[in-house]
């Protein structure tokens, strides 16, 4: 195998006041490759909530590759090889966690990423992903933070705990605490004397 593709899971934030996604976000929407197809299609509408796609942004995963002569990046998600076409495989369980618009300020900042006009043709040149275009237009047009936050809650934040639990049971959501535990372990290690490394190793082992 020359390249292994890791399907990505997308953050499903449950509050609109997240400041550190890596320690505060534990709910994720699972990738199509890791769910029951019938459940995915049966719940598609309620899982998108009127957004353009099932995931807010990308859903084609990320790849790792064996370093060999001729290897080069093929965009942001895959690798290619000038010498021979790489043999690709897909991880059946492992995934990349993608924290997408996990903070409200990420929405407001999107309006500052380019100075293009608001028409569709101009936005298509600035943003590949449709939801990025939606966010840019909304953040550019709405100056009232309270109204923009209400929109953010309706499109990005999952406030209905009962719904989240039902999708966890259906296998469309996953509750993953690993990043928060790892960050906590690293923070603890940074604040301890050199003799406390065993505790950090125990926390990391629990996270993994």
Image: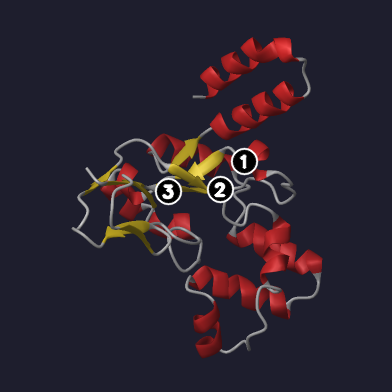
Check disc 3 and report the residue beneath it. 8
Horizontal side of 65 relative to 198 (left or right) equals: left
Location of residue 96 with respect to 142 vertically, above or below = above
Q: CA distance from mark 2 to mark 3?
A: 13 Å
Residue at mark 2: 12
Left or right placement of residue 64 versus residue 206 in this view: left
- Mark 1 or 2 closer to N-term? 2
Q: Residue 202 in the image: x percent, y percent? A: 58, 14
Residue 123, by quadrant, is bottom right
Dividing the picture into quadrants, the one containing residue 4 is: top left
Mark 3 falls on what kind of element? strand
Write the residue at 63% across / 47% down.
159
**Residue at image coords 80%, 64%:** 146
What residue does disc 1 label? 25
Of the 4 image quadrants, the one containing the N terminus is top left
Residue situated in front as seen by the camera: 69 or 20 = 69
Q: Which mark is residue 161?
A: none
Q: Position of residue 54 (x, y in %)?
A: 43, 59
């Amino acid at each position: 195998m020359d390249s292994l593709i890791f399907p990505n899971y997308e953050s499903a934030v449950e509050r609109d006041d997240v400041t550190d996604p890596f320690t505060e976000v534990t709910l994720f929407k699972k990738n199509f490759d890791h769910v029951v197809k019938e459940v995915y299609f049966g719940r598609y509408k309620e899982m998108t909530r009127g957004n353009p796609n099932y995931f807010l942004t990308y859903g084609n995963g990320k790849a790792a590759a064996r370093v060999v002569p001729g290897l080069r990046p093929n965009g942001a998600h895959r690798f290619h090889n000038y010498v021979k076409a790489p043999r690709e495989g897909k991880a059946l369980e492992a995934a990349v966690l993608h924290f997408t618009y996990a903070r409200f300020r990420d929405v407001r900042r999107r309006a500052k990423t380019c100075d293009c006009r608001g028409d569709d043709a101009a936005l298509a040149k600035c943003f590949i992903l449709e939801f990025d275009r939606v966010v840019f237009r909304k953040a550019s047009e709405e100056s009232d933070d309270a109204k923009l936050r209400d929109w953010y809650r309706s499109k990005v934040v999952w406030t209905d705990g009962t719904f989240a639990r039902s999708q966890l049971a259906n296998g469309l959501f996953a509750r993953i605490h690993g990043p928060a535990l790892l960050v906590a372990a690293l923070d603890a290690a940074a604040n301890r004397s050199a003799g406390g490394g065993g505790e950090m190793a125990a926390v990391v082992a629990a996270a993994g």
